Amino acid sequence: MRPLTVAAVQAEATPGDVAGNVVRAARLARIAADRGATLVVLPELFLPAYDPPALRASPATTDVAADGGGLVADARLDPLRAAAAGCATAVVVGAAVRRPDGRRTCAALVVDRTGRVAAAYDKQHLCGPEEKELFIPGTRGATLDIDGWRLALGVCYDGCFPEHARAAAVAGAHGYLCPSAYVVGSAHRRDVYYAARALDNTMYVVFANPVGGVDPWVFNGGATVYDPEGRPVARGADEGEEVVLATLDVSEVARVRAAHEMLAEHRTDLSADRALLTA
């Protein structure tokens, strides 16, 4: 497997303006591709913006529809399709998706290098009453295969659960892609969770996050690529639009997994039974 250059993006989206945010996403994808990225990760719900009032007020305009096979044909996405195909760069971006059975999900779309768009993964852990009111949780994981790299998909709060990333690593993932939406005031948790998921599972983590927004949904950037020991290889500031790039090397995954064997030695036979001691 050859090294893979990835971009983690932080940018501001306009609430409810899917068409405008698609144009912004396409511009950022082209910037990343011009700098050598084969894969670009944008934040959670970037297409409609992470703004619960806007999502609640107008599902018809903030959602994109997926067919029974998960494909998305919404014409508003054409600029992003064109950017991905023209640059031969895959894009992962957050969207609100309406499934054929009526379920509304907080999803990660994958735009492949031909411009085909699929609603690839539905967020499994919904965070707080706003998300639980708006969305139905997903029921299965998903992994993106790109040039032999196996990159698991998670969305924001999924990454707060060690077992989510661990299941992906056990299934063979070399990395974990996390479009997210962390608000101002959450920088400590933002910086701990995804570094920990990288080290827990000795795999790369690509974390994308918005900036700006409408109070109280104001976001704190910090887009980061973590190496398999949880160190930031590239990081954005807490404010301002940025495209941060890093090159993933499978030999580094192998080196770290040989040195730190938590993944190989994890036990599945442990139970909740505990001896109760008094002192």
Image (spheres, grey):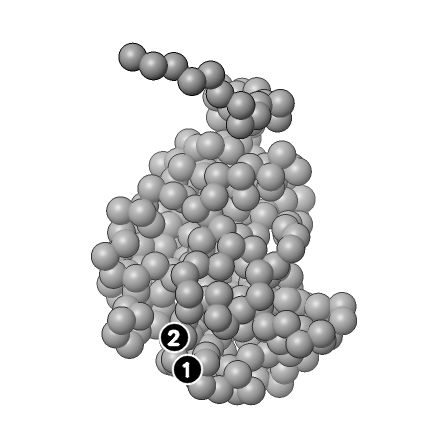
The image shows residue 13 at horizontal and vertical percentages of 38, 75
The residue nearer to you, when weighing 261 against 115, is 261
Is residue 101 shown to the viewer in this render? yes
Residue for badge 2 = 51
Which residue occupies 37% across, 50% down? 224
The residue nearer to you, when weighing 155 against 270, is 270
Check disc 1: other Cα within 10 Å, few if <14, some if 14-19, many if 20+: some
Residue 85 against residue 35 in the figure, above or below: below
Amino acid beneath label 1: Ala
Classify mark 2: helix, strand or loop: loop
Classify mark 1: helix, strand or loop: helix
Which residue occupies 49% across, 59% down? 126
| Image marks 2 and 1: residues in contact by CB distance under 8 Å | yes
Residue 130 against residue 162 in the figure, above or below: below
Which residue occupies 67% across, 73% down? 99
Quadrant of image for the N terminus = top right
The image's mark for residue 54 is 1
The image shows residue 74 at horizontal and vertical percentages of 63, 82
